[in-house]
Image (cartoon, helix red, strand yellow):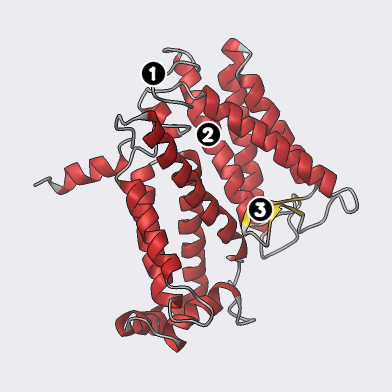
Amino acid sequence: MKSLGAKLRWLVSPAVDQVPIGHARAAASLRVLLGLLWLYNVSWKRAPDFGQEAGNGLFKFTSYAVSHPVLPPYSWVIENVVLPQFEFFGWLVLAAETALAVLLMTGTWVRAAAVLGIAQSIAIALSVAYAPDEWPWSYWLMIGAHALILFSSAGRVLSVEAIRAGLSGGAALLRATGALSLLVGLIAIVGSVSDPLAARGVLVGSQDLSVGLGAYNALGGVVLIVVGALLLAALRVGASGPRLAFSAAGLSLVAAASLYVQLGFTDPVLGGSATSAAYLLCVAVVATAAGRRMSTGSDGLHASVPGTAG
């Protein structure tokens, strides 16, 4: 039987066990899909009161655990511990779901993210499974999908895990992130022509389909274009590559921090939501991992082994 220490080491080790490439790609696709689920849904976790005053948003759905109880002891905890300190709880939920979005989208600490995803899915199910217009199977499927990720090689393709394990230099991941950031920035700028500095920005995605990479105004779009250009340039300039990648990471972190400081308190300069901030954190994680890989000068950014990508 494994010791607790061994289990914890396994939990944070790269999920890159050798499997057929088709299995790895399928697991990575599911990982990214789950990341998109959390990425979109952090947008309605709105500071500072998370819906408490208006009785909507996160507060409304959490309160269903009391009005439509699934498990009475859990309902007691929600009523007597969570709801009286709801702003603190709201920030915890925002942090947890942002972490899930970032870790799963970028393929970082995939197993730990899967465990967190299972726990968060169970918590949501215990709050809303008996609520009106809910489909309990949604939460069974969420739990099952994260459990599958936990025991898969979901970090073997297009992930920071593959970089950590030395299976990939990260060129494909960096290229995909840079190109996507350029595209998101361009869409934001074009969509913001009528109101370039709108505080809510333009959603890049579909509200009806609950899929999106954040909302940005024209200034936010410019930031994303600069970040994307830095990432793509880092692939081509040799010794200056790490500096460009780290510059992209720094700019993304500053932009994300500005959103967290402003959301719920004042109009965001970049437009956007918590989803926008989470996407910028994804970019920062990828840029940092690739920059560190390039700075070692070991096997080069493009190095990889057969059966891996990114």
Image coordinates of residue 242 in percent, x first then y, are: 56, 20
**In the image, residue 123 above or below residue 182:** below
Q: What element carries label 1?
A: loop
Q: Which amino acid does label 2 sit on?
A: Val
Q: Is mark 2 on a helix, strand or loop?
A: helix
The residue where tag 1 is placed is 305
Q: Which of disc 1 and disc 2 is earlier in sequence?
A: 2
Q: How crowded is mark 2: few (under 14 residues within 10 Å), some or many (20 or more)?
A: many
C-alpha gap between disc 3 and disc 1: 39 Å
Image coordinates of residue 16 in percent, x first then y, are: 33, 33
Q: How crowded is mark 1: few (under 14 residues within 10 Å), some or many (20 or more)?
A: few
Image coordinates of residue 94 in percent, x first then y, are: 52, 61
Give the quadrant of residue 59.
bottom right
Q: Disc 3 vs disc 1: which is toward the camera?
A: 1
Q: Which of disc 1 and disc 3 is earlier in sequence?
A: 3
Q: Which amino acid does label 3 sit on?
A: Leu
C-alpha gap between disc 2 and disc 1: 19 Å
Q: What residue type is labelled 1?
A: Val
Q: Which of disc 3 and disc 2 is earlier in sequence?
A: 3
Q: Is mark 3 on a helix, strand or loop?
A: helix
- Residue 66 visible within the image: yes
Q: Residue 259 carries which label?
A: 3
**In the image, residue 71 above or below residue 310:** below
Q: Do the residues labelled 3 and 1 touch (CB within 8 Å)?
A: no
